[in-house]
Image: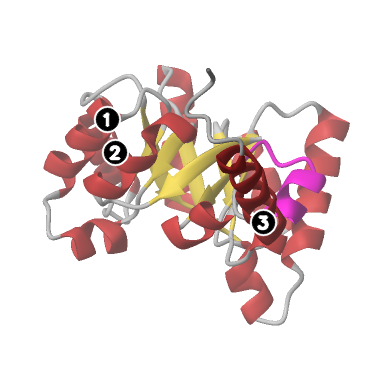
Amino acid sequence: MQIFLDTAEISEIEARAALIDGVTTNPSLIAKSGAGVMERVKEIAKTVSGPVSAEVVATDRDGMLEEGRKLRAIGDNVVVKLPLTAAGLEACRIFHEEGIATNVTLCFSLNQALMAAKAGATFISPFIGRLDDAGGDGVKLLEDIRAVYDQYGFETSILAASLRSLKHVEDAALTGSDAATLPVKIFDQLINHPQTDLGLDAFMADWKATGREGLV
């Protein structure tokens, strides 16, 4: 499973670039960073070699096409992020025919995921945490999308989004998600475990007791 960082902060990306497969952004994250969309996407696309999802802000098909082409012109690793609306799916189909990668976002149902796949989406982003908040079952949605995509041979990759806990990350992996995008807070917890820290402390204490330095 690929791991993407969900942020628009360059410092956060640079500090973790060796451990991530790509980056996802949205208008809210870029607005929070204080940068312009084009400027910040260019910076991110130069920082990582993997997919960089950059979202359009237009809500009509033609506006999405215009903005999406501008974003894609920044670099071959830029993925045009589109909302899961009728206009967004129309733009998705056209981008698919043009060979432009897309990430269809704000998915909350299996039917939506089915329509995105039929439109040729490169990625579908089910919002797990937000669906749970609304009384739904985010993990069940991941399971259902995986089953339907596999059954019909859809090539759209499942990008689990709105993950708010380590359990969400584990569930995304266990249900066969192709990728997951994580806020920095959750990403940084992935490698931590108290038993690892205790074990390392014990190893270092034993080595220090020998009076040696390094591996000599």
* Image quadrant assignment for residue 176: top right
Q: Position of residue 137 (x, y in %)?
A: 77, 70
The label shown at residue 47 is 1
Residue 169 located within the stretch drawn in magenta: yes
Q: Quadrant of the N terminus?
A: top right
Q: Amino acid at mark 3?
A: Leu
In this orientation, which residue lies closer to the viewer: 97 or 38?
38
Q: Taking 208 as reference, is 46 left or right?
A: left
Real-space Cα distance between discs 1 and 2?
7 Å
Per the rendering, the mark at residue 198 is: 3
Is residue 5 positioned above or below 123 on the image? below
Query: Disc 1 marks which amino acid?
Result: Thr
Q: How many marks?
A: 3
> Which residue reaches farthest front?
211
Asked if marks 1 and 3 touch (Cβ < 8 Å), the reply is no
Quadrant hosting residue 64:
top left
**Within 10 angstroms of label 1, few (less than 14), some, or many (20 or more) residues?**
some
Residue 187 sits above or below residue 138 on the image? above
Q: Position of residue 211 (x, y in %)?
A: 54, 35
x then y, percent, for residue 94: 43, 29
> Mark 2 packing: few (<14 Cα in 10 Å), some, or many (20+)?
few
Could you tell me which residue is drawn at 34 percent across and 54 percent down? Answer: 26
Q: Which residues are magenta?
A: 168-179
Quote the CA–CA distance across marks 1 and 3: 34 Å
**Residue at the spot of label 2:** 14
Residue 23 can be seen, yes or no:
yes
Marks 3 and 2 sit apart, C-alpha to C-alpha, by: 29 Å
Q: Amino acid at mark 2?
A: Glu
- 31 on left or right of 165: left
